Image: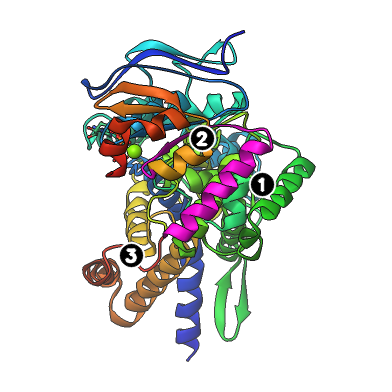
């Protein structure tokens, strides 16, 4: 049995300039896996490629046995891959509720959408009070919760989370990570990209370390947290 | 005083029509950053269509405007599919020049087929009907056109603000990639936006044939006014288009009456320049 997500030796480029030079990784169903690495290492590019916003120059990506390497993002989400992009990318002039509704765009059944809305308000109670507020007027933390909730509205099998902690104060980071762990417990497989290495590896089961477009380390979170190199390079210790 | 009411009513009535013409343009511009230079010619096509429907089939524009809306929906969608789509992402001016070419094509086609003559339907249901209101004479065809324009405009506004498809249109306008991540097929949204934009101007053109003559140049002035309205109202904003169009309609009728008919467009473009200098993003906007 193959893994839920299999990325095999992908190379990616922007306008012909290569930035990913052969990345391979796997995520098993139910896992929570972290990708860590310095700025510009290629973490977001990898995520964007998995989500279908861009296509690998070579290599393949398969999700639950299906080749999605050249599938567009509007199709991969229907298979169950949901990407919460770096910088949240909420629809700034729409309300929280409208943002969430769009997260379930592929679903036409009103009842199902309402159930999911309730689920999200249950997971992030703050969103319930703010549901009619325009997204751009939310605080940074609220925006991040809204972005995660929007990503969950499609009931994904695999959730890709890119730099959730960006711009959040430490106490909020902790809360957001708690929510992520909770979502994983509820059965959603998660692949997340993080700069907050310690925090990310605390909730993740395994991790990959990316450096200038390549994977340079991988292992269980414990192994990575103990690794001298990782501690030096990414945790400033 | 009577004159004042008359001029006021005339301004409002033309303003409401301008609003619908401009709304289509505004939507295309706001969602896709595409300037449809053939917008005036879309209007002309709808007018010819409803004129010939009236002339040949004897169906009054009071009803055939629906055909104008539907036909122009497809003209708009097809324009996107065949012309805009291929020119997007190329040189910055490509879509603009491509639609300019389309406008030339449509205009000259009509010139060639239908001659440059002005054609006005006669014997329409509302022809020449007027009534007195507060000392002013209100033209029934103009009033009906204005009311229908407003209703269609509000319908489009409702669609965009209150329906899921409308949110998807707004989402695509705000962040195309993020919209795709939601499962929105942005290609279809673009097609739809061009269709709706075409339908707006199609309805307007159809209604206008009740009291205005159609000729190959009829689109030029209306498209110019539509550009001013969109720039004033803010790209993509329908309430903005409505208010700006009313403003333009009023400026036009007041200067036309109290100053001189020949300067009314001078005033319109002067207002445009002033507002653009003070507020480059228009008075409203997404
Ligand atoms: N749209 C783009 N056009 C051209 N180059 C890009 C683009 N986006 C990213 N790159 C380049 O690709 C490389 C990888 O960028 P990427 O965004 O994947 O890094 P990252 O690991 O996510 O970094 P960060 O931690 O800062 O988010 C960088 O060198 C970056 O400059
Ligand atoms: Mg990144």
Q: Could you tell me how far apart the alpha carbons at marks 1 and 2 are, in whole angstroms? A: 65 Å
* Left or right, B74 with reference to B250: right
Question: Residue farthest to the top?
Answer: A1
In magenta, the rendered stretch is A169-196
Residue B63's mark?
Answer: 1
- For marks 1 and 3, the one nearer the N-term is 1
Do the numbered discs 3 and 2 sit on residues whose CB atoms are within 8 Å?
no
- According to the image, label 3 marks what residue? B282
Q: Dot 3: within a 10 Å radius of its alpha carbon, few (fewer than 14), some, or many (20 or more) residues?
A: many
The residue drawn where x is 34% and y is 23% is A217
In percent of the image, x 76 and y 43: which residue is there?
A110
Is B256 above or below relative to B230?
A: below
Q: CA distance from mark 3 to mark 2?
A: 49 Å
Seen from the viewer's position, the closer of residues A72 and A2 is A2
Asked if residue B202 can be seen in this view, the reply is no
The residue at which mark 2 appears reads as A204
Q: Residues within 10 Å of mark 1 (few under 14, many from 20)?
A: few
Marks 1, 2 in one chain: no
Q: Label 1, secondary structure: give it.
A: helix
Task: Give the structural element (helix, strand or loop) at label 2.
Answer: loop
Viewer-closest of B109 and A162 = A162
Q: Position of residue A7 (x, y in %)?
A: 44, 16
Q: Position of residue A11 (x, y in %)?
A: 31, 16
Percent across and percent down for residue B183 are 56, 33
Confirm whether residue B58 shows in the render. Answer: yes
Judge left or right: residue A21 versus residue B176: left
Asked whether disc 1 touches disc 3, contact meaning CB atoms under 8 Å apart, the reply is no
Q: CA distance from mark 1 to mark 3?
A: 35 Å
Same-chain status of marks 3 and 2? no
Asked if the magenta segment contains residue A192, the reply would be: yes
């Amino acid at each position: 049995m193959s893994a839920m997500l299999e990325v095999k030796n992908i190379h990616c480029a922007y306008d012909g300039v290569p930035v990913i030079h052969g990345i391979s990784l796997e995520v098993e169903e139910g896992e929570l896996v972290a990708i860590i690495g310095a700025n510009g290492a290629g973490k977001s590019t990898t995520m964007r490629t998995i989500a279908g916003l861009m296509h690998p120059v070579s290599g393949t990506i398969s999700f639950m046995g299906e080749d999605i390497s050249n599938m567009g993002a509007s199709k991969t989400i229907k298979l169950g891959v949901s990407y919460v992009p770096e910088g949240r990318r909420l629809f700034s002039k729409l309300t929280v509720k409208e943002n969430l509704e769009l997260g379930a765009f592929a679903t036409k059944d009103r009842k199902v959408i309402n159930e999911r809305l309730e689920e999200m308000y249950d997971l992030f109670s703050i969103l319930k009070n703010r549901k009619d507020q325009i997204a751009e007027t939310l605080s940074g933390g609220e925006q991040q919760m809204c972005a995660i909730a929007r990503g969950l509205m499609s009931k994904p099998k695999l959730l890709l989370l890119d730099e959730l902690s960006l711009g959040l104060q430490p106490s909020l980071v902790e809360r957001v990570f708690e929510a992520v762990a909770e979502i994983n417990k509820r059965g959603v497989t998660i692949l997340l990209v993080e700069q907050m290495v310690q925090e990310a590896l605390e909730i993740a089961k395994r991790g990959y370390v990316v450096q200038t477009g390549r994977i340079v380390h991988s292992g269980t979170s414990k192994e990575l947290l103990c690794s001298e190199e990782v501690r030096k390079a990414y945790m400033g210790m | 005083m009577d004159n004042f009411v008359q001029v006021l009513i005339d301004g409002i009535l033309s303003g409401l029509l301008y609003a619908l013409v401009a709304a289509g343009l505004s939507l295309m511009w706001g969602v896709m950053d595409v300037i449809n230079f053939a917008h005036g010619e879309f209007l002309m096509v709808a007018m010819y269509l409803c004129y010939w429907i009236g002339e040949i089939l004897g169906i009054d524009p009071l009803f055939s405007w629906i055909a104008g809306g539907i036909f122009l929906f497809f003209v708009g969608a097809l324009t996107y599919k065949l012309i805009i789509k291929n020119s997007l992402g190329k040189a910055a001016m490509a879509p603009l020049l491509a639609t300019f070419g389309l406008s030339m094509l449509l205009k000259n086609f009509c010139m060639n087929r239908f001659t440059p003559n002005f054609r006005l339907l006669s014997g329409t249901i509302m022809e020449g009907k007027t009534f007195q209101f507060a000392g002013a004479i209100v033209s029934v065809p103009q009033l009906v056109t204005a009311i229908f324009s407003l209703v269609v405009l509000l319908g489009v506004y409702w669609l965009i603000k209150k329906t899921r498809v409308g949110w998807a249109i707004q989402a695509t306008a705000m962040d195309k990639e993020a919209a795709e991540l939601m499962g929105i097929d942005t290609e279809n949204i673009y097609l739809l936006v061009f269709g709706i934009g075409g339908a707006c101007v199609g309805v307007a053109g159809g209604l206008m044939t009740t009291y205005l003559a159609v000729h190959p140049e009829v689109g030029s002035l209306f498209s110019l006014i539509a550009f001013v309205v969109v720039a004033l109202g803010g790209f993509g904003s329908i309430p903005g288009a409505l208010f700006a169009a009313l403003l333009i309609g009023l400026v036009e009728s007041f200067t036309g009456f109290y100053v001189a008919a020949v300067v009314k467009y001078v005033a319109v473009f002067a207002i445009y320049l002033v507002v653009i200098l003070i507020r480059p993003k228009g008075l409203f906007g997404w």
